[in-house]
Image: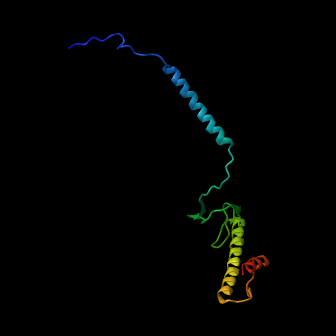
Amino acid sequence: MTKRLDDTDTHVSLSGKGLKGRMLAATVLGLALTAGIGGWAAHAKLAGAVISQGELVVIGETKQVQHVDGGTIVEIPVKIGSLVEKGDVVLRLDDTQLRIELGIVTSQVAQLKAMMARLVAERDGLDVLSFEGLELSPEVKREEAKLF
């Protein structure tokens, strides 16, 4: 029941790269990857805002300052050590984006009012479209009159 092994059965292949070669390749690959990511991080221009919380230290207690939407601070009228009272302005946010959004919403409201006036006139079978009592731009009136 014993079996004899040939030399070919016990032959171990030693072909291929050795441990030193593999370690060198792994080290070079790791350094190249680190240098590539580091170079990208150093030179990439990322457009975006960082949203964070701030704290104001008041005599004896800490107060958190938070804003629902965030924004860009354009002015901080108080200095370190300033005494402030309830209602004092401690920072001022840039309102440009809010003003733009207000203009867009105001325009949409005007368009919807003009549309409502047109639809009511169509429903009631009127011959003349009237925008009486509505503050609308000539362009909005013209567009709704075309649809009437």
Q: Where residue 92 sits in the image (x, y, percent)?
A: 69, 66
Quadrant location, the N terminus = top left
Q: How many marks?
A: 0
Query: Measured along the vertical axis of the image, is residue 135 above or below residue 88?
Result: below
Position of residue 124 measured from the top left corner of the image (x, y, whole percent): 66, 89
45 over 144 or under it: above or below: above
Residue drawn where x is 55% and y is 25% of the image: 25
- The quadrant in which the C terminus is found is bottom right
Residue at the limit of the structure toward the left, as seen here:
1
User: Measuring 67% from the left and 60% from the top, which residue is drawn there?
Assistant: 80
Task: Check the image and report above or below for 35 versus 53.
Answer: above
Question: Dividing the picture into quarters, in which one does residue 100 lie?
Answer: bottom right
Left or right: 65, with 110 as reference point: left
The structure residue drawn at horizontal position 71% and vertical position 67%, both measured from the top left corner, is: 95
**Residue 54: quadrant of the picture:** bottom right
Name the spot of residue 85 as percent of width and height, x first: 64, 71
* Occupied quadrant, residue 38: top right
Q: Nearer the viewer, residue 133 or 30?
A: 133
| Residue sitting farthest toward the right | 138
Please name whichever residue, 47 or 111, is drawn nearer the observer in this view of the structure: 111
Q: Position of residue 27 (x, y in %)?
A: 55, 28
Q: How is the image coloured?
A: rainbow
- Relative horizontal placement of residue 26, taking residue 108 as reference (left or right): left
Q: Nearer the viewer, residue 120 or 109?
A: 120
The foreground one among 16 and 27 is: 16
